[in-house]
Image: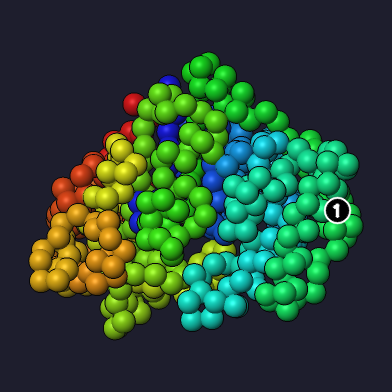
Amino acid sequence: MPALVLLGAQWGDEGKGKATDLLGGSVDYVVRYQGGNNAGHTVVVGDQKYALHLLPSGILSPGCTPVIGNGVVVDPAVLLSELSGLNERGVDTSKLLISGNAHLITPYNITVDKVTERFLGKRKIGTTGRGIGPTYADKINRTGIRVQDLFDESILHQKVEAALDFKNQVLAKLYNHRAVVAEQVVEEMLSYADQIKGYVADTTLLLNNAIDDGKVVLFEGGQGTLLDVDHGTYPFVTSSNPTAGGACTGAGVGPTKISRVIGILKAYTTRVGAGPFPTELFDADGEALRTIGGERGVTTGRDRRCGWFDAVIARYATRVNGLTDFFLTKLDVLTGWEQIPVCVAYEIDGKRVEELPYSQTDFHHAKPIYETLPGWSEDITKAKTFAELPKNAQAYVKALEEMSGAPISAIGVGPGRDETIQVNSFLD
């Protein structure tokens, strides 16, 4: 049985939660492999809507074991709050497993994130202010705090003091911010130890054994391809690798064990935060997409920037992730447009460019070249098969599939769990 990677093929917010939840009944493990509580998934089950920020979407599927891998950064307060909220709603969270090697977001990481972003002013990146970037920076600088450190007070104290020796100098002298007291940080972090300890496991060993035993393991990316720190629109990116390679390093599973890579595509394009966005709309169409699509960040609460579908980005996602399939979401949002533009290439310095430019300067100056496809007015939310879609909706999906370079194997026609057309099985 396969090990699958499921990730965003645009700038995030494509509907990964819905896709993960759709597969949850057939999957034994769902693994978050990067990011933190800067990501957000909305999953609709019946008349219940769940907003997940840190927890894997599989936590809503009975029989599925949700796993937070070593590549995730964990805010323990957010983790416990999210677990408590689900427990109050009757969701069983007891099967959750957390890698002991995952790094912890500390109070000083959040402080550094917020003061740095304020200091940048107009040059700010548009972070969520949740300490994600500074925590990954500590990890790379080898000054980070890991989940396992909660269970050795002496090591925890040494690591916090070592980290603050430098950070307090920066906070005081550069940002005119008061020093962070190490003892207070240690006390707060230790207060989470007993509540978290029961979830901690050697998740790398567990997941490799599960795959070897024929279990179905789904690796769930937290953000989109264009937010990848190596392959995204740098510097307007996240601080980790949502792309397929990140699943291997963020969960400790070798690439030869991955059998399928599924990219989630919205039927149009959105992004949150600053950075280039060639198809962004500033007119009534953009506002309509935002309103009809409910385009507000699950975690940030910020309105998403909206634009037409960008096939250049989709092709790029196919290439850097080795995508085998697409899951197209929110096709229903486009109902009612007589004509639907699709970006098929860019114009850069008077030249037509059909692949994503590697130059940041070129991408900032890219102008979309559109082809217009006929729209549809029929309600598609009740469609159960591809043949039940209006002819123009079928043609739109087929055109996007041809432009994007991988088959569209599932189509979201509404927000509900059952409002999905399965064209091909992801588990064959």
Q: Is residue 91 visible from the viewing direction of this image?
A: no
Q: Position of residue 38 (x, y in %)?
A: 57, 59
What is the image's colouring?
rainbow
> Quarter holding the C terminus?
top left
- How many numbered tags mark residues here? 1
Q: Amino acid at mark 1?
A: Val
Please identify the quarter of the rendering in which residue 106 is found. bottom right
The answer to whether residue 275 is visible is yes
User: SS at mark 1?
Assistant: helix
* Image coords of residue 382 (percent x, y): 33, 55
* 327 to the left or right of 247: left
Q: Position of residue 398 (x, y in %)?
A: 17, 50
Q: Would you place residue 333 above or below residue 92 in this image?
A: below
Question: Which quarter of the rendering shows the N terminus?
Answer: top left
Mark 1 sits on what residue? 186
The x and y percentages for residue 13 are: 44, 59
| Residue under the image location 35 percent in, 79 percent down | 287
Who's the residue at 85% across and 58% down the image?
Answer: 182
Which quadrant holds residue 363? bottom left
Using a 10 Å C-alpha cutoff, classify the residue at mark 1 as few (fewer than 14 neighbours), some (14 to 19) or many (20 or more).
many
Give the residue drawn at x 78%, y 41%.
149
